[in-house]
Image: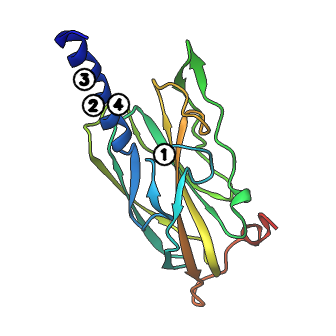
Amino acid sequence: MNQLATRILLAGIVTLSVDQAFAHFKFLEPPSALVTENGGKGAPPCGEGIPSGIVTKAQGGHPFTIRLLEFIPHPGHYRIALSVNSRAAIPKDADAEVKDGKSVSAPIDGNPKIPVLMDGAFVHTTTPRNTEWKIDVTLPNLTCEKCTLQVTQFMAEHALNPGGGYYYHHCADLQITADPKLPPADKAWMQLGK
């Protein structure tokens, strides 16, 4: 093999390695439900990786801070959902519009229903690498030992994420304690996933 061919081959290997090493986005706060993860790649609801066993305490009926780090930028937006009884209660990803094998857009629900807390967070078309996103969401005023907070990212202008469609998925486990001074959450929260 001549020197030019060797350099091209090595450049391709280095590029592949760099792409695999960087996440697409990850939790900064709360800690992820996975101790090792692949940037949200993999099947819903939580992507792929080894469970961390970390459960974060939170107060029901109050704002809860979520911080994300988007390592590899994609145009798109995020959705935040909470599963109280079972991860199976987390809704499926919205169908993406696709053209020539790449995602174009996905609908945003401006009036999300239980168990979605927020849809259309951090809508963007461009952003630099390593962008930090931060938002407060109000948790339902309920008690659960191990709820699942799911954050998904729709990526536009992107090929299929094997197992995950046109989305990346992350989860964090929460132990929520209801605030007795506030009205209880809608009973529908407790019925999902039973």
- Element assignment for label 4: helix
User: Mark 1 packing: few (<14 Cα in 10 Å), some, or many (20+)?
Assistant: many
Q: Please tell me which residue is depicted at 23% across the width and 17% down the height of the picture.
A: 6
For mark 3, give the secondary structure.
helix
Out of 115 and 52, give the one closest to the viewer.
52
Q: Amino acid at mark 3?
A: Ala
- Report x, y in % for residue 130: 26, 45
Query: Which of label 1 and label 2 is nearer to you?
Result: 2
Q: Decide which of 189, 99 is in the foreground and name it.
A: 99
Amino acid type of the residue that numbered disc 1 sits on in the rendered structure:
Tyr
The residue indicated by pointer 1 is 78
Q: Would residue 69 appear left or right of 165 to someone viewing this image?
A: left
Q: Nearer the viewer, residue 138 or 74?
A: 74
Q: Pointer 4: what residue? A: 16
Disc 3 designates what residue? 11
The residue at which mark 2 appears reads as: 14
